[in-house]
Image (cartoon, helix red, strand yellow):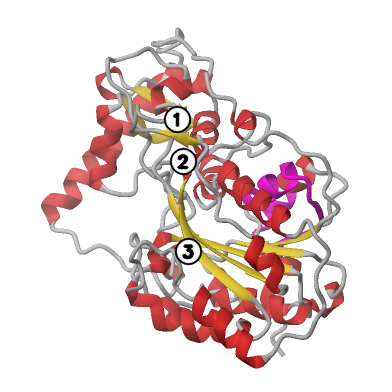
Amino acid sequence: MDTTPKQKPYAATGTEASWHRGWILTDAKREKFRQTSLKSQAAKARAMRGECNKPKHPIPTPRLDPCTLMPKRRPNGLRALSLFSGGGGLDIGFDRAGYEHVASYDILPLVANVLGEAWPERRVIAGDAGDVTQMDWRIYRERVDVLHGGPPCQPFSHAGSRAGAADVRDMIPELVRAVVEIRPRAFVCENVSGLATKQFARYLQAVLFEPLSRNYTIRMFILEAASFGVPQRRKRVFFVGFSNKQAAERFCEPTPTHVWDSATTKLSKTMGAREALGLDTLGFDGLAPTIRSGLTGPRHSTSVVNSATSLRDWNALGIWPNGVAPDRHAASLFVAKGGHYRLSLADCMVLQGFPADWPIKPPVYKALGLIGNSVAPPMGYAVACAVAKALSMPPNRTRTTSSSREARHGRAYGVRLRGSLK
């Protein structure tokens, strides 16, 4: 009898994954890629031999401290459970908003290293034990006030095939199951803004709204990371549900604290990418393109480029987004084409809104996977604060009538989507 553990299809990686689609390359294109790879290898070898033993550009000191975007609040007495914790973006936001986490779950083993080092006292369940599909969540009933999580975004991302429920990585049904079994006072689900498009309207109705609307008033809205001081173009959709009608009515969608492209406001200005990283001015600055996850695709990529357009934007900023270095010193020794500033892991964390001392470490492709897949912590913090404010009064345990439930569902589904589900 074969006792070898079977690989779970939703946890597969590389070319063996069911969602992998190889490129069809002509001989000319294949040769072009080969020459590019050889040149990159040669440049790295020269740097490793010490031929670039003096920094080719100064090592900058970042001007942005992401912790200033999410001031630490006093404990609010609310208990949170984290699913799909990843690099800890939502966990950081909720922690700094005053919540106490009872546990964090993720199928990636390296999550235990990051969150375990950041919060030694935290219960972190990672690897096979962190597989949410195998959990009986009823053990957390009456122990959790707010459940939060960002299920894998690949089934809905514009950067993928957008297969939705047909993609084995679709874990939104598992988050819904956790909510049903735990019955928290509130839940927060985050994902890429592509999930809020018309293509997935029926999916959301069947998978999320119908199973939960009997017991929860659900709000759906889109936030932009730059509206909360994060120097990156990054839109995300949030679903926030409350079991108590009064709490739902008190909830207000987080309002921007910062602005990037307007001088006619009293809001603080979001720094551009160069200013945030402490780079010299070029007479031009802008928000960083969306940082790509290094764990997507068949190869172990150390690039954060997700499209040809984003590469042009990085080039305009004078920042080299390919071959991210493990630290700023290494980046200074291996200068990119055109004298562009080469990114390091620490730089990517600044651009994503992570604290400078957050313990995400090499190998680079794994670190970028955690960073690029994460919620920008200041954006998660804004949502966490808004939820805490709505829950600040004791829940009303008055039984809700079926007619009021229908009204709640009709009012909540698709609200304030700025036309996304019309």
- Assess whether residue 105 is covered by the magenta stretch: yes
Amino acid type, label 3 = Cys
Asked if the residues shown at circle 3 and circle 2 are in contact, with their CB atoms under 8 angstroms apart, the answer is no
Question: What distance separates the C-alpha of mark 2 from that of mark 1?
Answer: 7 Å
Q: At 39% across and 76% down in the image, what residue appears?
A: 200
**Residue 327 locus on image (x, y percent):** 55, 26
In the picture of the structure, the residue carrying the numbered disc 3 is: 153
Q: Please tell me whether mark 3 sits on a helix, a strand or a loop.
A: loop
- In the figure, is residue 261 to the left or right of 137? left
Distance in Å between CA atoms under marks 3 and 2 = 21 Å
In the displayed structure image, the side of residue 405 where residue 47 appears, left or right: left
- Residue where numbered disc 1 is placed: 270
Q: Tell me which numbered mark, 3 or 2, is placed earlier along the sequence.
A: 3
Span shown in magenta: 88-113
Q: Position of residue 263 (x, y in %)?
A: 35, 27
Q: Quadrant of the C terminus?
A: bottom left
Marks 2 and 1 close (CB-CB < 8 Å) = yes
Neighbourhood count class around disc 1 (C-alpha, 10 Å): few under 14, some 14–19, many 20 upward: many
Task: Give SS at disc 1.
Answer: loop
| Residue toward you, 47 or 316 | 316
Is residue 101 on the magenta stretch? yes
Which of 318/183 is in front?
Answer: 183
Q: Is residue 326 above or below residue 174?
A: above
Residue under the point 65% across and 67% down? 248
The residue tagged 2 is 227
